[in-house]
Image (spheres, helix red, strand yellow):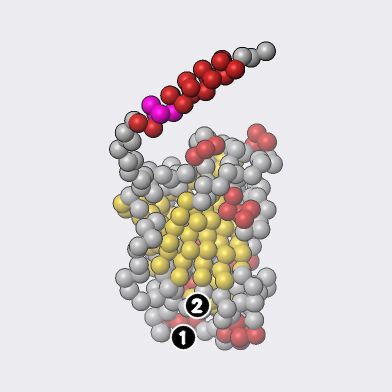
Amino acid sequence: MISLRWLHAVTFGWSLLAAVALAQPPGPPQAPRSPRAAAQVDLTGNWVAQITEDWRWRMITPPKGDYASVPLNALGRQVADAWDPAADAAADEACRAFGAGGIMRLPTRLKIAWTDESTLRIDTDLGSQVRVLHFDPAARADSGPSWQGHSAAEWLGVPPPANPFGALVAPTQEAGAARAGRSPAGAAGGGAARAEPQSTRGSLKVVTTNLRPGYLRKNGVPYSERAVVTEYYDRFGMFGNDYLQVVTVVADPTYLTTPFVVSNQFKREPDDSKWNPTPCATDAPLGTFQRPAF
């Protein structure tokens, strides 16, 4: 049986240790890490779109009125049915299909790099667009509405769901896709060849507002200046390749009845030797292939 004297001695000892610990002066406050230093996944580098689905809408310019699978309301269908590429070109609106709501769906290449400790930049060769992702909550749009709008970014730090592909895929799945209600990418790809520790993985969430009216597809399927574009960026590896998965959710009370959700995949390239910037263009012949991105 434990004696009462022994219990008192143990209690006194723990109390003494606690008092000594509390008497120690606190260490210097730790400076918060920058968004770049705190990055949960490395998205930088050169990437090329992998068009493994929806060729009819992505690799060609669809005919006017082909807005199947887009949840347009009556006004949205009316605007799409009235699409006139010549009028867009004449009004200096050739970049409508290259705005933040549609650019990631096109057969483009990306260059992603940090411009400072809290700003990530994405260049596209198709349309020669520049997207600037701000991690600083204090950053504000310094101009009026634009094709790429104002993008606020944050690391979500959400652990990936269970890997359904076994040894084929590195142990990171597109957490953003799961949150957006999309199934994980299969052979279409998306993700990371280098396997970081589980604790470093997580999605990048980007919310873009302050947009000029643009197109979800090159054939005039519209989104308005009230649209909010939410994206989730993730990496994973498959078959020895490094992929980037971008889930895009466009919510627009003007033209859409429900959010329009798509999943886009990009494959890492070793360098920018295939980088080929081209301007926005509305004069591509209907029904002909655009420049392949493979």
Residue annotated with mark 2: 226
Label pair 2/1, CB-CB below 8 angstroms: no
Q: Does residue 236 appear in the picture of this structure?
A: yes
Q: Residue at x 31, y 51 (%)?
A: 116
| Residue type, numbered disc 1 | Ala
Neighbour class for label 1 at 10 Å: few (<14), some, many (≥20)?
few
Q: Between residues 245 and 89, which one lies in front from this camera angle?
A: 245
**In this rendering, position of residue 136 left or right of residue 99:** left
Q: Main secondary structure of the magenta part?
A: helix
Q: Between residues 98 and 175, which one lies in front from this camera angle?
A: 175
Q: Position of residue 250 (x, y in %)?
A: 56, 69
Q: Position of residue 173 (x, y in %)?
A: 60, 45
Tell me which label, 2 or 1, sits earlier in the chain. 1
Q: Does residue 266 appear in the picture of this structure?
A: no
Residue annotated with mark 1: 87
Neighbour class for label 2 at 10 Å: few (<14), some, many (≥20)?
some
- Can residue 243 be found in the magenta stretch? no
Q: Which residues are magenta?
A: 17-21
